[in-house]
Amino acid sequence: MRSLCFSPEAPPLRRPVTQHSLALLCRNNRRTLSEVTVEQTIDAAATIFAKWDVERPSYARSTTLFYESKTEAVNFIRSVNDLHKIMRFLLNDRGSGSEKLSQVQRLLQIAMKRLQKEFYQILSMNRAHLDPESVSSRSSRTSTKSSFSDYDFNFSPDNEIRAAGDSISEVQEVSFMAMSDLKLIADCMIACGYAKECVQIYNSIRKSIIDEGIYKLGIEKLRFSQIKKIEWDVLNLKIKDWLEAIEISMRSLFPGERILCDFVFSSSDSIRESCFSEITKEGAIALFGFPELVAKAKKWPPEKSFRLLAMYTAISGNRKEIETIFSFESSSAVRSQALKSLTRLSESVRSLLSDFESTIRKDSSKAMVPGGDFHPLTIYSMKYLASFAEYSNILADIIFDWSPPAKSPPRESYFYSPIPVASPASAISARISWLMFVLLCKLDSKAKCYKDAAVSYLFLANNIQHVISVVHESNLHCLLGEEWIVKQEAKVNRLVDNYERLAFGNVFASLPKNPTAPMTPAEAKQCFRKFNISFEAAYLKQISCVIPDSKLRDQIKASIGRKLVAVY
């Protein structure tokens, strides 16, 4: 405006300048020069706009300005910006006629139609280069910012695209060029009051891309009534698809769209917020709402609860990313849906833990396992608990504020080692310890079904040894601790001693207390006879016994051998 007020060709002043005369001179020169500037700006704009008028039957209707000539495209944008300044100038200058103002407005309408077409064509022609994965990949290489809202998207038309860095690939460079062109057009249209038209084009195309991406990932908009009718095998496949979908969505689909939206509409916080929410809200709610429907729809058997834990882990592990990507107030429904799914999954997991405990307590099978072998309940329970322990970090959050189970004082002192609940980690340890206590109590009651007390002790020794082995080989070892294992091993040793005493007690008693003492042939013969009878009786009973654990089997054989062989 200084150049409009003062002319470099103004003659030197020969008399003192008063404030009134200086103001008068400025106004006269300003009007004269501004009229010239307005005419020149309008003429220059009219020339370039006429060339690219979408209403005229020319090659401009079948080609793209930004594709044909980047330099001419930048000049086109500059002309629009200059013309917009002229329009504002004319509106503020009461001395200007309405004819020029109408001319400027008509030219701006022509320009906006061209920019709308350019904006649509760039978005359409570059769908592959502007897919969320390409955008997120480019941003991760060229930006050092960690927050989506903090990306530096300043762009100058005079800068060459290579300013983004020579290290980016050709595909990423095309992506960045398209993004830069979109931003240039969006900034111009928003500044000229055509934000609505720009946003409509952007939302229409980008929403179709996100919806298509969600569909290709296998995410459907299902209702609760539909989920209830799906068989487990089919639902299990859908859960697998969902687990892959959330990984891809949170790695590229939603972050890429957020980056693109923030870049293109960086000149307006309200527009980039509304666009991103409009584009992603429906797909994101469908994605994060699926686990809630699954958790509500089925009464799961305990062994299938790990699918729920896997879904909980997937959402919980992406919690920070969800909060960051969907940080806008208009995206609060997405954050709320993710939280609702976590809550529902948490409730279902707790319910399944209670069901698992109830399954152990209610096991009423009275059939004795032949030979004191592993009981099916022991194998099933330990397999479940070992798998359960793999989710200990997640379970710590789920169980921390869960009220502790009612304990059974008479047996607690023998089987259960209470762990004070002071943190999420100790909460899961206490819960696992409690479930172990319930299992061991149940095994104790099943051991009483054996008529032979020796086999009863062997049954307990076998099953507790299996429990110890699984604990050693799984994450249960970290949860229960070394002290718990030592106590159970001592218990096994006591059970083995009792088994040997009852199974081979008569055999031990048939041998002389002092084998080196003198003995008549008749006494020796009687001694061997008693030993053979008692050993044969023990043999006939114990030949059907089973000790699956090789370490425990060798331990018992060695113990019996030490007591018999040397004396014999």
Image (cartoon, rainbow, N blue to C red):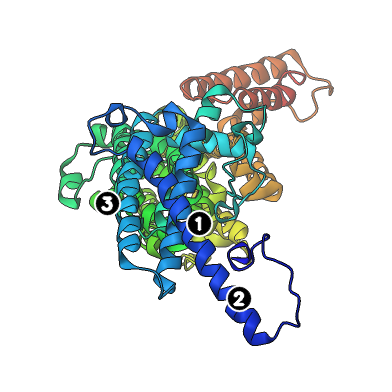
Judging depth in this view, the residue of 488 and 274 nearest the camera is: 274
Q: Are marks 3 and 2 in contact (CB under 8 Å)?
A: no
Q: Where on the picture, by quarter, is residue 105?
A: bottom left
- Residue placed at 30% from the left, 62% from the top? 99
What residue sits right under mark 3 in the picture?
A: 293
Instruction: Report the quarter where the C terminus lies.
Output: top right
- Residue placed at 54% from the left, 26% from the top? 547
> Given the image, on which type of amino acid does mark 2 rest?
Leu
Q: Residue 25 in the image: state x and y as whole percent.
A: 60, 75
What residue sits right under mark 2 in the picture?
A: 25
Question: Which badge, 3 or 1, comes first in the chain's sequence?
Answer: 1
Q: Is residue 7 left or right of residue 384?
A: right
- Residue placed at 34% from the left, 63% from the top? 101
Q: Is residue 531 left or right of residue 383?
A: right
Q: Residue 422 in the image: state x and y as whole percent.
A: 63, 67
Judging depth in this view, the residue of 339 and 386 nearest the camera is: 339
Query: Mark 1 and mark 2: span between their CA atoms?
Result: 18 Å
Q: Residue 174 in the image: state x and y as whole percent.
A: 50, 28
Q: Is residue 469 left or right of residue 284?
A: right
* Camera-side mark, 3 or 1: 1
Q: In terms of secondary structure, where does tag 2 sit?
A: helix
Callout 2 crowding tier (Cα within 10 Å): few <14, some 14–19, many ≥20: some
> Given the image, on which type of amino acid does mark 3 rest?
Leu
Q: In terms of secondary structure, where does tag 1 sit?
A: helix
> Given the image, on which type of amino acid does mark 1 rest?
Thr
**How many numbered discs, if any?**
3
What residue sits right under mark 1 in the picture?
A: 37
Question: Which badge, 1 or 2, comes first in the chain's sequence?
Answer: 2
- Residue placed at 30% from the left, 34% from the top? 218
